[in-house]
Image: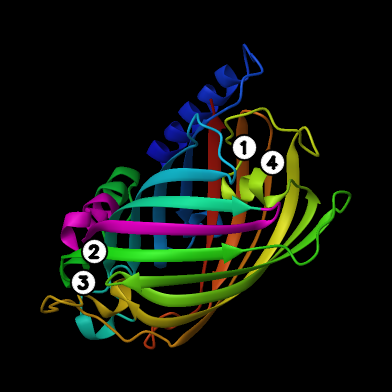
Amino acid sequence: MKVLFFTMLMVLTIFASAQQNDSGKPLRHQLSIISENDAYVSLYTDRYYTNGIFFNYTWISKQPRTQKKIQSLQLSQLMYNPYYYRIRNAENIDRPYAGLLLLTYSQTHFWGKESLLQLSATGGISGKPSLAGSLQKWYHHAVGFDPPAGWNYQVTAEPQLNAGALYATSLFSTESSIVAVKPVVEVSLGNTFTNAKAGILFQLGAFEKNSQSIAWNATVDNTQQSRRYRYELYFYFYPQIIAQAYDATIQGALFTKETGAVSKAQPFVYQQTIGGIFSCKKMFIGFSVIYQTKQAKTQYLDDMYGSVRLGCRF
């Protein structure tokens, strides 16, 4: 956590300097960091999806296009634990120890004012080479927590390859509206996650149209664009239904002989996100709380964690 706080402090320092010397030129690049952890909602839990860190670089080409297209690279590490992270017996592990280290490239295409399609490709590694177990052991030692005892039962290492698509539009939103209703559908296919998601994003506050909104990292641009607001400040509620066919963090390796303590995935999961975000010309900050029903059939309890999002544009 200390390392994370220092990282966020450094990013905030970049924010402060980024606000100076505003030349009025379009901002074509964005750097951001997302930190997800169950400690953000409770200091007394360390279970299930216990930590995720995402480093993002988003950009738009210099050449204006008829339809806006932004591109993004994301480096991420995800960490999963059972309910009791000190469990030493495989038969008592309700959700597998698992780690992922991933690199994702995505393109988001916008047309009209409110429709978008995002396509992504992800590669990486699961299991011990993801360094999730090593990071948790180091962190627990550094802060004086009891060491996690079951990482020797983590899912088997396997190269990961995934593809994804997301489509969103607006059902209800006008130029003067402070309320928006936006259906979102997602599909993922690969040996990391194979699933389909359907949800509705409800927004309340001052927000831009999809092609200019921080909701989709669309605040980068190659020309000066007129906007509804000098800044975005809104709250949102995002319920989703997830149909799971495969989850490597629960079921383990797909093409490699699995030696870890694994489980079976629940066919359907409900997830909801409640949060808020503030975005001005060169920076943004957001916080959300995510609740999930049980993802694994052997999982004792539902899951909940927090997400902090920071970024700057230049």
Q: Compare marks 2 and 3 and give the one earlier in the sequence.
A: 3
Q: Are marks 2 and 4 in contact (CB under 8 Å)?
A: no
Percent x, y for residue 157?
Answer: 15, 66
User: Of marks 3 and 4, which one's residue comes earlier in the chain?
Assistant: 3
Q: Which residue is mark 2?
A: 160
* Viewer-side residue, 42 vs 194: 194
Q: Nearer the observer, disc 2 or disc 1?
A: 2
Q: Is residue 281 left or right of residue 35?
A: right
Residue labelled with disc 3? 155
Q: Identify residue type, mark 1.
A: Phe
Q: Nearer the viewer, mark 1 or mark 3?
A: 1
Please, which colouring scheme is shown? rainbow
Mark 4 nearby-residue class (10 Å; few <14, some 14–19, many ≥20): some
Q: Earlier in the sequence, mark 2 or mark 1?
A: 2
Q: Which mark is residue 284?
A: 1
The reply to whether the magenta stretch includes residue 123 is yes
For marks 2 and 4, give the one nearer the viewer. 2
Q: Is residue 281 above or below residue 155?
A: above
Q: Which residue is mark 4?
A: 278
Residue 89 x/y as whole percent: 20, 80
Q: Magenta span covers which residues? A: 112-137
Helix, strand or loop at disc 3?
loop
Using the numbered discs, state the Cα–Cα distance from disc 2 to disc 1 in whole angstroms: 31 Å
Q: Earlier in the sequence, mark 1 or mark 3?
A: 3
The three-letter amino acid code for the residue at tag 4 is: Phe
